[in-house]
Image (spheres, grey):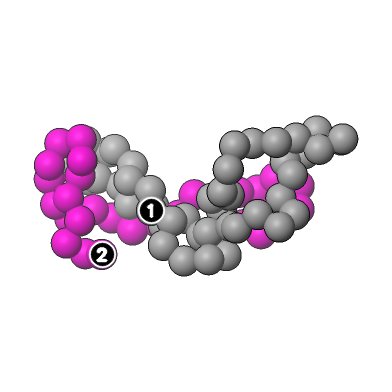
Amino acid sequence: MSDLHCTHCGEGGLEAGFIMDSGEHAKGFARWVEGALERGFFGGAKLMGRPKWEIDAYRCPYCHHLELFATRPA
């Protein structure tokens, strides 16, 4: 994905990175979950049986806008 351009300013050369998740039971990186947020009995998100995808993040070095892509199943 090195040919990506910023959707905000149009510049190229986006820098690869990731969105860190350091919450309780976190795996260290954020994931995209299909469907609207539903909370369980104790307030956490209901995740059972829902598709989850890893998030790739790219930052524009010019305007600092973030571009996020869900490219592969988690």
Disc 2 marks a residue whose amino acid type is Met
Sequence-first tag of 1 and 2: 2
Mark 1 near mark 2, Cβ–Cβ under 8 Å? Answer: yes
Is 9 in the magenta?
Answer: yes
Read off the magenta span: 1-29
> Secondary structure of the magenta portion, mostly?
loop
Q: How many marks?
A: 2
Residue 69's disc is 1
On screen, 29 above or below 64? below
Q: Kindly identify which residue carries mark 2.
A: 1
Numbered disc 2: secondary structure: loop
Is 71 in the magenta?
Answer: no
Disc 1 marks a residue whose amino acid type is Phe
Asked whether, in this view, residue 1 is left or right of residue 54, the answer is: left
**Considering the image in quadrants, where does the N terminus appear?**
bottom left
| Residue at point 33%, 52% (across, down) | 58
Numbered disc 1: secondary structure: strand
On screen, 45 above or below 27? above
Q: CA distance from mark 1 to mark 2?
A: 10 Å
